[in-house]
Amino acid sequence: MISFLIFGPPGSGKGTQSVKLAEKYNLIHLSTGDMLRAEITAGTELGKKMSLIMSKGELVPDEVVIEMIAFKIDNSKGSAGFLFDGFPRTVAQTIALENMLNGRGMKIDSMLVLDVDHDELVKRLIARAELSGRPDDKDPSVIENRIDVYKSKTEPIINYCREKGIYQPVNGMGTINDIFKRLSDSMNKLV
C-alpha cells in the first residue's frame, strides 16, 4: 500500500485535486476534517469524545486523530493506498503518523506540495467565497492569516519531508486539468 501526503496553502486546490487523484489511483482520500465531522455526525464513541473536546473550543489531540486514521486504515480494504489531505499539520503529527503506518508495514511514500503564487491564492479564495458562500474566504485579513498560519505550521513539515527525500513540489498554477496532469506525473513515478 502506498501513502501520499498532499499539501498546499488555502486556495491551492488540494481538496479538488485529492478527489481526482484518489479516484484515478484507487486511493482512499483521508481528509481529517471530513473524518472528524463524520464521526461526530455518526455519534460513534470516538465522535462523542471529539465533540466534547471541540465543544470546549479545544483542538482534538494528536493521538485521537491518529487513532481515527488508524481505524480507517484498518477497516479499508481493496484500495491501492491512502491520500492524506490536511494532515499532518505539525512535525510531531508527521512522526506520529509515520509510527502508526510503520506499525502496519506502511510508510509515507511522498509529500506532494502544490506551489501557487500568493496573488493567485487570494484570487482563488475570493472566487471560492462567491461560489460557496464561505465567509472565511471573503475577508482579505482572514485570507492572509490563513496563508501565514499555513506557512508557519507547514514549512517545518516540508523541511522534515525534504530531509527524508519524499518532498515533491508541484506547480499549482494553471487549470485544474494542468495541475492534475503534473500531480499525476509525480505520482506515476511511485506507483
Image: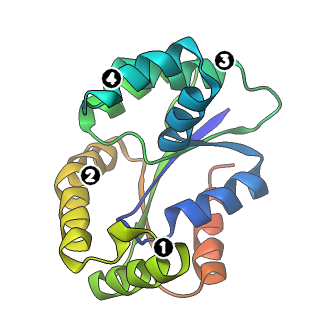
Q: How is the image coloured?
A: rainbow
| Residue 53: image tag | 4
Instruction: Pick the residue in front: 135 or 104.
Output: 135
Crowding at mark 3 (Cα within 10 Å: few <14, some 14-19, many 20+):
few
Closer mark to the observer between disc 2 and disc 4: 4
| Residue 154: image tag | 2
Whole-number angstrom distance, CA of label 3 to CA of label 2? 27 Å
Whole-number angstrom distance, CA of label 3 to CA of label 4? 24 Å
**What residue sits 78% from the left and 36% below the top?**
79
State the image quarter where residue 146 is shown: bottom left
Dot 4 amino acid type = Ile
Crowding at mark 2 (Cα within 10 Å: few <14, some 14-19, many 20+):
some
Dot 3 amino acid type = Asp
Dot 3 or dot 2: first in sequence order is: 3
Is 143 rendered above or below residue 152?
below
**What residue sits 65% from the left and 75% below the top?**
181
Whole-number angstrom distance, CA of label 4 to CA of label 1? 27 Å
Dot 2 or dot 4: first in sequence order is: 4
Badge 1 marks a residue whose secondary structure is loop
Dot 1 or dot 3: first in sequence order is: 3
* Residue 131 x/y as whole percent: 54, 80
Crowding at mark 1 (Cα within 10 Å: few <14, some 14-19, many 20+):
few
Closer mark to the observer between disc 3 and disc 4: 4
Dot 1 amino acid type = Gly
**What residue sits 68% from the left and 32% below the top?**
1
Q: Which residue is mark 1?
A: 133
* Residue 100 x/y as whole percent: 47, 18
